[in-house]
């Protein structure tokens, strides 16, 4: 089976063609800020990015007619169960009115446009809005508010399957705590193939390179009455908080160098706090699983840091074995999501 994979980001569009699970072609199409500036909304970039994808495929000699499916990154949909979804008119309409402006919303739109008028199926896989929280997990302590689920579902579930295979079992038959350590940090308790508790990437849990994580409520209220506007505050908390607010960098390698080689006390304090907060999240998630945990999985870009993973192990390895699976496998994960449907191992879900 040949699968075209599309993964739009804020400044690039990654595409690849997989023959089964092997990449036969990969390309990262960069988008300069000046090229994106004329577009008021993310959805306005559709034609521009579509044209660049078509050009790249033409140059590589890849014909759409040779493909068995197109699989795209899912956007900010309504809450959905995990799985592979067929892109249809309802999905397209939802992405034009998505819950949040984000480049990921373009994935389904690009897949739809590329396959429209053909028999080639288009899919999106495990979007960030996967919500499998149990009812008890939704209660906040303030009746008008309810907890919702946003997390790196695509990489979580992919690494969950990989970790389960290492344990000699399947994702659906084990309990895992998975921590994605990227630009955003999300941790989740996975019980028998379902993420039953998560640290919402925008509201809760450990801070990350540029996101605040959980903050003291009273101080947040004070910030909201400091004279800054709503959008400015949200932007600061979602893209200019976390490590960058302390150290002015979004590169964890710089943090590590400053903390240990240059012996910068502030960098070391932030490094230690990251390991501490992440371990605190893992402990609370272990309680959700009644401490019946088969493994703790550390993944994402920051998991390449042995200092960080060793620091976390020092806190949590008595709970369960710690598996370090660094990096992200988003492109392969998207291909695998389509392949599970094409080979009949799963049924495509209706949005």
Image: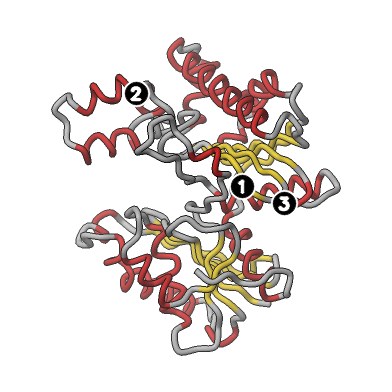
- Gap in angstroms between the C-alphas marked 3 and 1: 9 Å
Q: Which sits earlier in the primary sequence, circle 3 or circle 1?
A: 1
User: Is residue 90 or residue 259 the one in the foreground?
Assistant: 90
Q: Residues within 10 Å of mark 3 (few under 14, many from 20)?
A: some
Residue 8 position within the rendered picture, expressed as x and y whole percent measured from the top left: 43, 60
Q: Residues within 10 Å of mark 1 (few under 14, many from 20)?
A: many
| Residue under numbered circle 2 | 217
User: Is residue 111 or residue 14 the one in the foreground?
Assistant: 111
Q: What is the quadrant of the N terminus in the image? A: bottom right
Colour scheme: secondary structure
Residue 46 position within the rendered picture, expressed as x and y whole percent measured from the top left: 33, 70
Residue at the location (53% across, 83% down)?
A: 64
| Residue under numbered circle 3 | 161
| Residue 56 against residue 149 in the figure, above or below | below
Foreground: disc 3 or disc 2: 2
- Gap in angstroms between the C-alphas marked 3 and 2: 36 Å
SS at mark 1? Answer: helix
Q: Which sits earlier in the primary sequence, circle 3 or circle 2?
A: 3
Mark 1 vs 2: CB contact within 8 A: no
Residue 29 position within the rendered picture, expressed as x and y whole percent measured from the top left: 43, 62
SS at mark 3? Answer: helix
Q: Which mark is residue 156?
A: 1
Q: Quadrant of residue 54?
A: bottom left
């Amino acid at each position: 089976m040949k699968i075209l994979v599309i993964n739009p980001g804020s400044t690039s569009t990654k595409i690849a063609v997989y023959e089964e699970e092997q990449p036969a072609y990969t390309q990262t199409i960069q988008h300069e800020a000046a090229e994106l500036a004329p577009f008021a909304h993310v959805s306005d970039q559709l034609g521009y990015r579509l044209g660049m994808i078509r050009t790249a495929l033409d140059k590589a000699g890849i014909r759409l007619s040779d493909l068995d499916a197109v699989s795209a990154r899912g956007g900010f949909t309504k809450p959905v169960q995990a799985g592979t979804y067929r892109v249809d008119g309802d999905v397209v309409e939802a992405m034009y009115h998505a819950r949040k402006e984000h480049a990921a919303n373009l994935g389904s739109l690009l897949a739809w446009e590329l396959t429209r008028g053909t028999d080639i199926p288009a899919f999106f896989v495990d979007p960030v809005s996967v919500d499998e929280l149990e009812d008890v997990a939704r209660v906040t302590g303030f009746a008008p508010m309810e907890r919702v689920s946003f997390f790196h579902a695509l990489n979580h579930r992919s690494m969950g399957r990989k970790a389960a295979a290492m344990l000699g079992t399947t994702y659906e038959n084990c309990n895992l705590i998975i921590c994605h350590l990227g630009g955003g940090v999300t941790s989740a308790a996975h019980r028998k193939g379902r993420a039953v508790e998560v640290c919402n990437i925008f509201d809760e849990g450990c801070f990350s390179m540029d996101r605040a994580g959980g903050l003291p409520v009273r101080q947040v209220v004070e910030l909201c009455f400091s004279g800054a506007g709503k959008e400015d505050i949200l932007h600061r908390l979602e893209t200019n908080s976390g490590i960058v607010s302390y150290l002015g960098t979004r590169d964890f390698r710089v943090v590590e160098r400053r903390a240990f080689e240059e012996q910068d006390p502030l960098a070391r304090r932030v490094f230690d706090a990251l390991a501490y907060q992440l371990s605190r999240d893992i402990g609370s998630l272990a309680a959700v699983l009644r401490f019946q945990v088969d493994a703790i999985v550390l993944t994402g870009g920051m998991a390449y840091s042995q200092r960080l993973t060793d620091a976390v192990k020092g806190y949590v390895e008595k709970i369960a074995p710690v598996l370090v699976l660094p990096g992200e496998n988003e492109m392969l994960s998207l291909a695998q999501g389509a392949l599970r449907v094409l080979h009949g191992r799963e049924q495509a879900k209706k949005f």
